Image (spheres, rainbow, N blue to C red):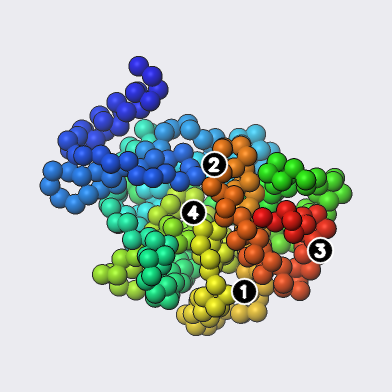
């Protein structure tokens, strides 16, 4: 029996054990991860979502006590403080989000050791799909901001717990932020062979980002979803307030600067967020959090937003060149436009000069 057959037998046994062995199974389209999803249709009752995250498909997550050297030896997930797709992380984060009154899916059954879970089906009304279909984006983005405010006002715990599970909420620290930024100089030249970053250019790159990384690490104070954008948010208009935002793909949560998830939402790689919508969202956030120093937050939002955009550009270059997923190249021009907007902040003049000197306009496509 091959590996795929073995995995299928494990999945079928799990479903049978929990009473869904006879449910119809419909595969759902995947994302850039190692997870797979199916929609279950039991003979009675609502549809459900079946999550399959094969154990050991990724390098290990970061141990809370790991040193930078330990993390480098463990691999990319430990360096970046990603959850390595772990089902126990997903379950623990979901339980915490629900305890805050937010709409993470209910966990109906799970086996963390086997990497399987059955979840509440929140439906298909992704923000991105509804907006593309003509729905007014304003109430959706307002609700998304209300969700961020709920996250940013809740004390960020040291650990997230569920029955039999304790998952650490680690800081998005300088090592993780450096790992994020350094993906671009490693992978963009493989996508754009005309680029060749000299040792001097790489040294300058690191020096420019060092104080930005320090600001991000020092400001790591709130629960951060980490992938908070319109293709991971589901509209649930029958619920109230921030609970109208159904949350997906949150297992990589960390404690981070509040500007990080704001950048994920408003520097959306997969859809255009207009300058007008960006300003309206930021204004609404400041209205709901009047205690903030707005000028300082915007400075951090531009700087950490630039780092986040650079991270995503590097990841997309890697997905295209290493993983054979060419569709991600189509998102990159949008990211370059967002980056230009961030680099218009005079405080980022050195970074703008670096890009102008090392990544000409003809390579920002």
Residue 44 screen position, x and y as percent:
12, 47
Q: Earlier in the sequence, mark 4 or mark 1?
A: 4
* Neighbourhood count class around disc 1 (C-alpha, 10 Å): few under 14, some 14–19, many 20 upward: some
Q: Residue furthest top?
A: 1
Where is residue 7, by image quadrant?
top left
Helix, strand or loop under label 3: helix
Where is residue 343, by image quadrant?
bottom right
Say if mark 3 contacts mark 1, CB within 8 Å: no
Q: Earlier in the sequence, mark 4 or mark 3?
A: 4
Q: Closer to the camera: disc 3 or disc 2?
A: 2
Q: Closer to the camera: disc 3 or disc 1?
A: 3
Q: What residue did someone put label 1 on? A: 297
- Near-viewer residue (180 or 131): 131
Q: What residue did someone put label 3 on? A: 353
- Near-viewer residue (268 or 169): 268
Distance from Cα at disc 3 to Cα at disc 1? 23 Å
* Neighbourhood count class around disc 4 (C-alpha, 10 Å): few under 14, some 14–19, many 20 upward: many
Distance from Cα at disc 4 to Cα at disc 1? 21 Å
Q: What residue did someone put label 4 on? A: 253
Q: Earlier in the sequence, mark 1 or mark 2?
A: 1
* Neighbourhood count class around disc 2 (C-alpha, 10 Å): few under 14, some 14–19, many 20 upward: some
Rendered position, 67 above or below 344: above
Q: Earlier in the sequence, mark 3 or mark 1?
A: 1
């Amino acid at each position: 029996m091959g590996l795929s057959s073995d995995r299928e037998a494990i999945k079928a046994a799990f479903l049978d054990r929990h009473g869904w062995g006879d449910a119809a199974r419909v595969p759902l389209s995947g994302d850039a991860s190692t997870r797979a999803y199916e929609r279950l249709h039991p003979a009675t009752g609502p549809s459900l979502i079946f999550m399959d995250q094969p154990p050991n498909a990724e390098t290990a997550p970061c141990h809370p006590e790991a040193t930078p050297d330990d993390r480098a030896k463990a691999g990319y997930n430990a360096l970046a403080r990603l959850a390595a797709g772990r089902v126990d992380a997903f379950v623990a984060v979901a339980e915490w989000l629900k305890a805050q009154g937010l709409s993470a899916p209910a966990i109906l059954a799970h086996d963390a050791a086997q990497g399987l879970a059955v979840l509440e089906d929140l439906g298909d009304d992704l923000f991105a799909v509804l907006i593309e279909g003509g729905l007014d984006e304003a109430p959706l983005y307002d609700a998304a901001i209300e969700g961020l405010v709920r996250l940013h006002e809740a004390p960020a715990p040291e650990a997230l717990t569920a029955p039999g599970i304790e998952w650490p909420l680690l800081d998005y620290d300088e090592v993780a932020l450096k790992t994020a930024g350094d993906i671009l100089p490693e992978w963009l030249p493989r996508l754009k062979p005309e680029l060749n970053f000299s040792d001097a250019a790489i040294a300058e790159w690191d020096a420019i980002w060092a104080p930005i990384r320090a600001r991000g690490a020092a400001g790591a104070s709130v629960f951060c979803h980490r992938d908070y954008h319109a293709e991971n948010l589901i509209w649930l208009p029958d619920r109230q307030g921030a609970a109208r935002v159904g949350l997906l793909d949150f297992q990589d949560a960390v404690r981070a600067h509040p500007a990080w998830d704001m950048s994920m939402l408003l520097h959306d790689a997969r859809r255009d967020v207009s300058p007008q919508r960006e300003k309206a969202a930021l204004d609404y956030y400041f209205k709901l959090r009047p205690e903030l120093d707005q000028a300082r937050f915007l400075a951090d939002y531009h700087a950490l937003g630039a780092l986040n955009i650079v991270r995503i550009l590097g990841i997309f270059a890697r997905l295209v060149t290493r993983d054979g997923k060419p569709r991600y190249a189509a998102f990159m021009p949008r990211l370059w436009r967002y980056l230009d907007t961030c680099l218009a902040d005079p405080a980022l003049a050195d970074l703008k000069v670096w890009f102008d000197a090392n990544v000409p306009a003809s390579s920002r496509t």
